[in-house]
Image: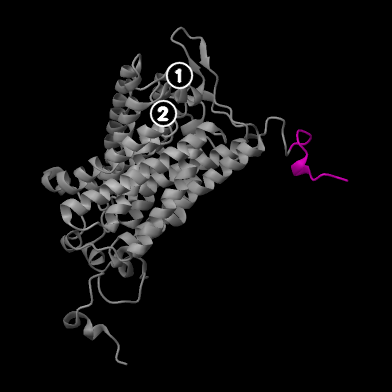
Amino acid sequence: MSVPVAYQGNTSAAVADWLNKGDNAWQLTASTLVGLMSVPGMVVLYGGVVKKKWAVNSAFMALYAFAAVWICWVVWAYNMSFGEELLPFWGKAGPALDQAFLVGRASLPATAHYHADGTLETAMVEPFFPMATVVYFQCVFAAITLILVAGSLLGRMSFLAWMLFVPLWLTFSYTVGAFSVWGGGFLFQWGVIDYCGGYVIHIPAGVAGFTAAYWVGPRTKKDRENFPPNNILFALTGAGLLWMGWAGFNGGGPYAANVDSSMAILNTNICTAASLIVWTCLDAVFFKKPSVVGAVQAVITGLVCITPGAGVVQGWAALVMGVLAGSIPWYTMMVLHKRSKLLQRVDDTLGVIHTHGVAGLLGGILTGLFAEPNLCNLFLPVTNSRGAFYGGVGGAQLGKQIVGALFVIGWNVVVTSIICVVIRLVVPLRMPEEKLAVGDDAVHGEEAYALWGDGELYDDTKHSAAVAPV
């Protein structure tokens, strides 16, 4: 009986001898989980957590970014991030569209790691699946980064300016971080540890979002003072999709369905759960009410904090990281933010500088402390890597983590500022006051709900005239 081509192991072009079907199936699944974190995850979260009049605009900013990144990624940005080296921090631009490139065995040509004397220490990354799978996996990471940046800009950025910002920031900021840390650039070669995105995704998103928020300007005074979520259950749904989707986010990091992937997923859940419990307890103790929106923030900080070290720290370390993820960003957001003139001046709508910038930096530093030597050997190209807690070269690793973070922060402040200034020469960054006063209906001609009010409780003295007669 004839066997379909797809199942003819090592006998057809569809099933090459290097293909591991299990690894490929997991990587495609992990990629789709990360994609679901954005669409519908972040779309629903943004649509629910903002004021009613901005629900459509906020959700659409996320959806647009996801689509725009896809086109930029396959036309030029993938190879800038993971292709051949152009500069120590940048790959050569080029399309990822040719079938000969996409169906061949995946490889990251700049990731071969060498000793100081020039001899090969670790061969380049060559997963057991086609290049198309890597392009897909890395694309959804790039897309969610832009969506995270949008969280700082909701409720006032011109949509046309956002349409320009997405491809520019992807090209001149994201690709630099991705190549430097993951694609074989100078931070990769130096041995900076970023298991799955603390330095490539979260610190850049927090810093770039905060910087762009400075250039765009604040929301209206009324919106800054009164910005209630229009649908907390939507926000919880989005947060749930993020939490479960993070299994693909961190579990896909090793490019294989292996023991390290399992460790990363377990640690992700330990850290996130601990963060939520600690944040909720702090809210209950200091503000007398456990906040659901606070719990959503805690889920995010826990997920972000564990990401740089998900597969290289032990379970007890993930628990410690979760406790710190639920307390340090809580302090910077709920206490320090209200005391800092700089933080008060810049209108970071969803506090992305805290949930991603602070949590990502915290995770990177804690990875430099807790990276376990045996787990490091399962994943990292630099042999004998370890955190400071384990002695030896661990102290130097902690220093590398700090320096790597400083490079990422500096690059994003400068490049994001340049991008915003350039866009401002073409179109206004901020919506005009008349659109800001109305919101979705003025910007898109659409509204999320055919209801009265801005999310406040019903008040007969204000809303009775808006209620149609029976």
The residue under label 1 is 382
Task: Say if residue 96 shows up in the picture.
Answer: no
Q: How far across and how far down the image is residue 70, in percent? A: 49, 47
Q: In the picture provided, is 255 more to the left or to the right than 275?
A: right
The mark found on residue 181 in the picture is 2
Residue 88, located in which quarter of the rendered image?
top left
Dot 2, how many residues are within 10 Å of its Cα: few (below 14), some (14-19), or many (20+)?
Answer: many
291 vs 71, left or right, is left
Q: Quadrant of the C terminus?
A: bottom left
Can the viewer see residue 6? yes
Q: What label sits on residue 59 in the rendered view?
A: none
Front residue (pair 443, 333): 333
Q: Nearer the viewer, residue 190 or 326?
A: 326
Q: Residue 239 in the image: state x and y as whole percent.
A: 38, 54
Q: Quadrant of residue 124?
A: top right
* Of the image marks 2 and 1, the number of the one nearer the N terminus: 2
**Magenta region includes residue 9:** yes
Mark 2 secondary-structure assignment: helix
Q: Residues within 10 Å of mark 1 (few under 14, many from 20)?
A: many
Residue 388: x and y in percent read: 32, 21
Three-letter code for the amino acid on which mark 2 is drawn: Val
Give the SS element for disc 1. Answer: loop
> Residue at (13%, 48%) from the top-left corner?
338
Q: Main secondary structure of the magenta part?
A: loop
Residue ID at (59%, 30%): 127
Q: Residue at x 48, y 46 (%)?
A: 34
**Which of 258 and 270 lies nearest the eye of the viewer?**
270
Mark 2 touches mark 1? (CB < 8 Å): no
Extent of the magenta region: 1-13
What residue appears at the point 45 percent right and 32 percent down from the top-left corner?
311
| Residue 52 part of the magenta segment | no
Which is more toward the observer, 175 or 335? Answer: 335
